[in-house]
């Protein structure tokens, strides 16, 4: 059993965050590079019909996965307090409740998955690969997904609540590598779609084995049994209900834009928009490696420490979010069209559209600090209407703007929803329910950071635009390095005197020294 007493958690919190960030970067690399390689090889060996069928199956499974509705995030929140106090009986009761919920979800996913099979003939046109039974291969895709809800799903939630995202990320890296390497080999060697689909079974088996190993090694003292009282069950159900809207908002927000672009502009413009948005998504995934590692530690801190000390953490993470958003936005503004030209052969959008893409990205990143603390505190009920209002407003704005100004309209709609609905609403929810009395201080700090941040972006883009380059992949890499270094130097000058920046600097130096000391001890030992 891992020793996770409150004192040990406080001592190791920074270390857990560092491990989580490093491992999450590994997940990001594996999850982006290998699928791209497999998709390319798949297209040239099995053909576009098989690739289209595979994309269809993936889309169906993505919709079915909505039935999870963020229940795991809700249960992680409820585990923070008993973990911080070493209440193993309460931990076991919560996990028992979670296990029952996931069994129901697994059954629901299987029933829904089977019930939509008769509609496949209406959803897929006649270009089905010859000799393929689409229902059989769909079941090969569906069964491993259902199995993940039934085979020790509580282990992943338990690791997240114990701040061990590094271990959950390790499971993801190992199991995905096994699946991707197997699928790549069978596509190249056998060119068999059946063997390729069996890779998902291999993935499910690998996950089950890893979960069992962690269960037997780390959590043998936790018995998954016991009942929760009526009030606790009501609180869990309340937060699950409120989480539904947030999950729909997270997964369906950009889908509305895609629908209107397709309906009014056609599939060609949608494909170009999708390529640009894919690049944006990869950058967001890169930064999310940092934020996802911070969430469990902030949940533990909220459960065990004072509001004032946690507001100091809030300010530090707010500073970090502005630093990361500024760096990434500067690079996107300077490199976006160059990358798209080298990748797709054309740079389709002018500077205004690129500015709108970067504005959307910037706003989505600077709000992450509020989201982290709101989720760590479990305040989904407090802004439960926000996602529905935001989705409705986005729909209405797209309805008006996309037919008039095209792609710009879709991006402006999303920016308005984030800036005028989502950010103010979730900020009010957090500061009304947890950081009471700190709102004015937060607004002042946020405005100061934003002014410094925007000045860096404007200056970096202005200086970079003075240079003229002959475009190639090598030159693009050089431009990325120059832009990154230039932006980082300006960030040091503009943020270097702030209290939060100094705290981060001190923390990083301490962590580097500790890591160097551990390496030295191991070598000498």
Image: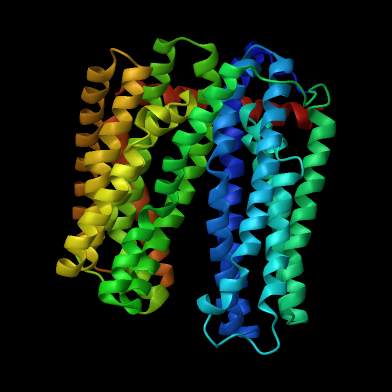
List x then y, in percent, for residue 515: 63, 29
For the C terminus, which image quadrant? Answer: top right
- 101 or 30: which is nearer to us? 101
List x then y, in percent, for residue 310: 43, 17
Total marks drawn? Answer: 0
- 261 or 182: which is nearer to us? 261
- Residue drawn at 18 percent across, 69 percent down: 403
Asked whether residue 188 is in view, the answer is: yes
190 versus 502 height, above or below: below
Question: Farthest bottom residue?
Answer: 130
Please identify the quarter of the rendering in which residue 217 is found: top right
Please identify the quarter of the rendering in which residue 337 is found: bottom left
121 versus 177 height, above or below: below
Asked whether residue 512 is in view, the answer is: no
Q: Left or right of 493: which side holds 126?
A: right
List x then y, in percent, for residue 101: 65, 37
For the N terminus, which image quadrant? Answer: top right
- Residue drawn at 35 percent across, 24 percent down: 430
């Amino acid at each position: 059993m891992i020793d996770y007493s409150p004192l040990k958690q406080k001592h190791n919190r920074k270390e857990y965050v560092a491990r989580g960030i490093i491992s999450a970067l590994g997940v990001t690399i594996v999850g982006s590079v290998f699928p791209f390689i497999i998709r390319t090889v798949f297209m040239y060996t099995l053909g576009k019909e098989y690739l289209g069928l595979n994309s269809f199956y993936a889309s169906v499974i993505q919709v079915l996965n909505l039935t999870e509705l963020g229940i795991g995030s809700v249960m992680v929140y409820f585990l923070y307090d008993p973990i911080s106090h070493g209440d193993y009986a309460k931990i076991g009761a919560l996990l028992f409740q979670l296990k029952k919920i996931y069994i129901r979800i697994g059954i629901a996913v299987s029933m829904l998955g089977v019930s939509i099979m008769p509609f496949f003939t209406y959803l897929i046109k006649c270009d089905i690969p010859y000799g393929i039974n689409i229902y059989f291969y769909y079941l090969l895709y569906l069964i491993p997904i259902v199995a993940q809800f039934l085979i020790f799903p509580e282990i992943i939630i338990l690791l997240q609540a114990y701040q061990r995202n590094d271990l959950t990320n390790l499971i993801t890296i190992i199991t995905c590598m096994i699946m991707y390497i197997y699928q790549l080999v069978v596509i190249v060697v056998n060119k068999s779609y059946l063997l390729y689909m069996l890779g998902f079974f291999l993935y499910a088996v690998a996950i089950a084995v890893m979960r069992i190993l962690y269960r037997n090694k780390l959590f043998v003292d936790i018995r998954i049994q016991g009942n929760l009282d009526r009030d606790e069950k009501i609180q869990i159900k309340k937060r699950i209900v409120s989480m539904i809207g947030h999950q729909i908002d997270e997964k369906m927000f950009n889908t509305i834009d895609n629908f209107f672009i397709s309906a009014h502009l056609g599939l060609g413009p949608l494909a170009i928009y999708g390529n640009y948005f894919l690049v944006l998504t990869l950058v967001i995934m890169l930064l999310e490696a940092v934020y996802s590692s911070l969430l469990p530690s902030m949940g533990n801190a909220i459960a065990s420490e004072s509001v004032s000390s946690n507001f100091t953490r809030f300010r530090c993470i707010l500073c970090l979010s502005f630093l990361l958003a500024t760096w990434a936005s500067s690079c996107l503004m300077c490199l976006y069209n160059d990358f798209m030209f080298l990748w797709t052969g054309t740079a389709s959008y002018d500077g205004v559209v690129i500015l709108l893409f970067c504005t959307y990205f910037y706003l989505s990143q600077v709000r992450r600090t509020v989201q982290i603390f709101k989720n760590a505190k479990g305040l989904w009920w407090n802004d439960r209407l926000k996602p529905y209002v935001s989705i409705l407003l986005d729909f209405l704005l797209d309805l008006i703007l996309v037919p008039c100004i095209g792609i710009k309209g879709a991006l402006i709609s999303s920016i308005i929803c984030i800036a005028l609905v989502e950010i103010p609403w979730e900020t009010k929810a957090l500061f009304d329910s947890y950081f009471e009395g700190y709102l004015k201080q937060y607004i002042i700090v946020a405005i100061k950071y934003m002014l410094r941040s925007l000045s860096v972006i404007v200056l970096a883009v202005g200086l970079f635009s003075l240079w003229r380059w002959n475009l190639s992949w090598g030159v693009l890499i050089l431009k990325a390095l120059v832009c990154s270094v230039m932006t980082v130097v300006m960030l040091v000058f503009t943020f270097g005197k702030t209290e939060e920046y100094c705290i981060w600097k001190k923390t990083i130096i301490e962590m580097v020294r500790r890591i160097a000391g551990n390496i030295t001890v191991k070598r000498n030992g």
